[in-house]
Structure formats: C-alpha cells, structure tokens
Image (cartoon, rainbow, N blue to C red):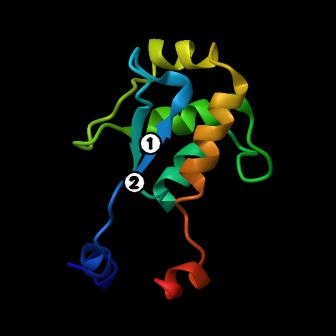
Amino acid sequence: MGLARELRNRRKLSARKIEVAAWADPDGQPFAIYCYPITCFDMNEMQKKHPNFMDGMTLASMVDLIVLKACDESGDRLFSSGDDKHDLMGEESAVITDIAARMFSAVESVEDHEKN
C-alpha cells in the first residue's frame, strides 16, 4: 500500500446532513440529504462534464453535483443520473443552488480544520 492510500485511510470522514425544507414531507419534516466531503476525484468528474465548473457553476453542473454526492443516511446514493437528473432540472433554481452551496460548504479551509 502506498503512503497516499495509507494517509487517506487514516481519515475518518463523516457525512454532512443537509435539510431541504422545500422538499418537506406532509408533516413538515424537511427532507434530509447526506453528503460526504467533495474529493479531488469528484472535482475531476465534474470538470470532465463541465469544463468551466471551477470558474462558474451552472445550474446543470449543480444538478450533476447533487446527483453525484447526495446520499441517504446509510450512504446509498439518492439519485441516478437518468430520470432523476431530468426531474431535478425542473426544480426551482433557488432550491438547487442552496443544496449545491451547502454541499460545497462542507469543504473546510485549512484554518477552519485547524480550529477543530
């Protein structure tokens, strides 16, 4: 095993819970999405689909990010890339941008990480 893999295996990553009030159930409970930190691999996949992803995200790239990263509490993917992507593109833009922004906010700066 290489050093990079050994170091990566030492990290304990936990999923971040994102509550989406716009998708609340009939009792008013917000829908919960879980998202593990965005990795270099994820960023590479996003840039393959959306070459200007780092310069300015489009709504389509935000939907792809949600499809890629959204999980349930068990860590299973919530969305597939087919029909779910098409249906998410029909969602209000404010909901999509809020979810994508909160997924990115899980990326801590070095300073924030050192405070913890």
- Please identify the quarter of the rendering in which residue 25 is found: top left
* Above or below, comparing residue 11 to residue 39 in the picture: below
Label 1: element kind: helix
Determine the CA span between mark 2 and mark 1: 7 Å
Q: The disc labelled 2 sits on which kind of residue?
A: Tyr
Mark 1: amino acid: Lys
Count of numbered circles in the view? 2
- Which residue is rendered at x = 29% and y = 75% of the image? 5
Query: From the viewer's perspective, is 89 left or right of 84?
Result: right
Tell me whether circle 2 and circle 1 mark residues in contact (CB < 8 Å).
Answer: yes
Residue receiving disc 2:
36
- Residue farthest front in this picture: 27
Residue 102, percent from left and from top? 58, 49
Compared across the picture, whether 79 is left or right of 108 comes to: left
Residue at 32% in and 65% down: 13
Q: Residues within 10 Å of mark 2 (few under 14, many from 20)?
A: some
Residue 69's mark? Answer: 1
Q: Is residue 89 left or right of residue 6?
A: right
In this view, the residue farthest toward the bottom is: 114
Instruction: Give the side of residue 6 with respect to residue 22, left or right.
Output: left
- Quarter of the image containing the N terminus? bottom left
Quadrant position of residue 90: top right
- Residue 11 visible in the snapshot: yes
Q: Where residue 94 sits: x, y (%)?
A: 71, 30
Given residues 72 and 6, the one toward you in this image is: 72
